[in-house]
Image (cartoon, grey):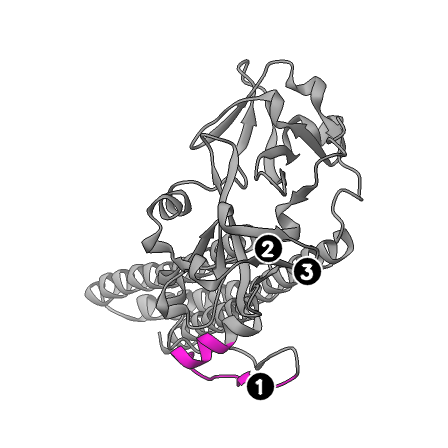
Amino acid sequence: MNENPAKRVIRTQEIIGKQVITLQGEDLGAVARVLVDPETAMVAGFTLNTKGWFKGEKAFAFSSVKAIGNYAITLEKKDLVDSLNNLPSLEKLSSDFNIYNTRVITPSGELLGTVEDFGFDADSGKIESFLLSGGVIRNLMQGKALIPVSAITKIGPDVIIAKNNAGESLQKADSGIVDNIDSWKENLQAWKGNLDNLKDDVEKGWEVTLSTAKEVSKKLGEKVQELKEEGTDKSRAFFSKTASKTTTFLSDSKNELVSTYEAWMEKLQNFKNRNRLSTDELSALLWKKVGKDIHDNNGNLIIAKDGEVSPEVLDKIQQAGKTKELLLSIATRDVAEKLETLRKDSEEI
């Protein structure tokens, strides 16, 4: 399946992060998300990463676009951008529908794959194809494949339904499908490295936690057994009860650590998929402490290790495009604090 050469088909990975400029020379921010209307299979609009996150998420309709260039999207004037809550149709799509990671299934129940990206006509906004991974593609294509929108019968709220013979339309995606594929690959590799490093740090800490718990449990068990042997029947009963409470306490503490780890990994994965945080998610980061220094791309310090995230700092983080680094830094500190609490609690028992 080859896309029509007469059309200029753009992948959303090329759009995310692209600057939005007015013809009056105003820089309005960078594209954060591409909003899709599942009923029409069209790009409906875009949201922006802008200064002053607390002012609300900004957006503009695809129909407002003057042109999509290799560097920027141009608009006639800045008035075409508005708060998302003032654009009800786009706001609904923003909250109700996310096409990424949506499963593509045939009527016979075969999973073709999940949507990793899609291409759309730069002039009309019409979706032309989906980039799929997983499913039968993992076995048949050893990677990723393109499926034309003509092979799709319905884009539903949870699942995309393809024709029964849609597998015949699949074409292996080559490495040149995106103009800036090298940069895209580097970004993905950096993400993988960051997530792997975080996982490594947490798992190392978890190994220490398990070792500490085993050592504490052993010492407690030996102490309880010693006291039981030396004491009366009444004291034996008392210490048996105490040992039970201790075991429950340690178990609860470890469960809290596991929950913290899993919650952060989910947040990081969600951010990777969406490349954005909602206003509520950003608000939840306020006054959290970071585990390491964070600098902008010019080397200027935005926040130092152990510093608290104020609204001003959060704005600077957003403007510098360092939200990912902030999440990782807060996550590692949060997990480290849980580890330290467990260690101290175990020593006091």
Does dot 1 land on a helix, a strand or a loop?
strand
Against 34, residue 162 (above or below) is above
Dividing the image into 4 quarters, which one contains the N terminus? top right
Report the Cα–Cα distance between label 1 and label 3: 28 Å
Does dot 3 land on a helix, a strand or a loop?
loop
The three-letter amino acid code for the residue at tag 2 is Ile
The three-letter amino acid code for the residue at tag 3 is Tyr
Against 290, residue 236 (above or below) is above
Q: Which residues are magenta?
A: 299-316
Q: Is residue 126 magenta?
A: no
Q: Earlier in the sequence, mark 1 or mark 3?
A: 3
Left/right placement of residue 5 relative to residue 75 reads right
- Residue extending furthest toward the left: 234
Give the labeled residue for mark 1.
301
Left/right placement of residue 231 relative to residue 185 reads left
Of 9 and 1, which appears nearest the observer? 9
Q: Earlier in the sequence, mark 1 or mark 2?
A: 2
